[in-house]
Amino acid sequence: MNGVFAEVSPPDRLVHSQKFDQAWTPGENQVTTTLEERGSQTIMTITTLFPSTESRDGMLQHGMAEGAAQGYDRLEAVLKTLR
C-alpha cells in the first residue's frame, strides 16, 4: 500500500491518495479526512473516492469496511483512556 498527501490543511482536513498492491483493488483511491469540533467532541469523517465501481466492490468484498470499523473502535477505546 502507498499514497501521497495532496492536501494538508491543519487542523481539520487531509487529502491523500491510496493505492493497494493487491489486484482486487485496481486503481488509486482519493481519501479525504475532515475533523469537526462539536462541543467537547471531535467528529472525524473519512470519505473514499474509488476510481470505479469494480475497485469499490473489490475492497468491500475483502472486508475493508469491517476492518476499518474495528480499527476505529480500538482507537476510540484508547482515546477514552486519555481523558
Image (cartoon, grey):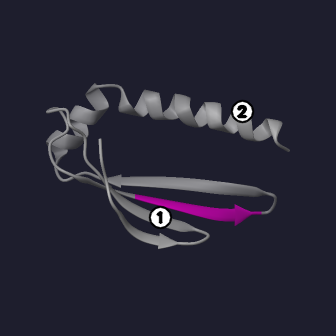
Q: Quadrant of the C terminus?
A: top right
Instruction: From the image, tell me which residue sits under label 2.
Output: 77
Above-or-below relation of 42 to 77: below
Q: Left or right: 13 with respect to 18?
A: right
Q: Quadrant of residue 59?
A: top left
Residue in the foreground of this view, choosing between 8 and 13: 8
Q: Amino acid at mark 1?
A: Leu
Q: Marks 1 and 2: CB-CB under 8 Å?
A: no
Q: Earlier in the sequence, mark 1 or mark 2?
A: 1
Q: Quadrant of the N terminus?
A: top left
| Range of magenta residues | 32-38
Instruction: From the image, tell me which residue sits under label 1.
Output: 14
Residue 44 percent location from the top left of the image: 59, 54
Residue 32 percent location from the top left of the image: 42, 60
Residue 5 percent location from the top left of the image: 38, 63
Residue at the extreme right: 83
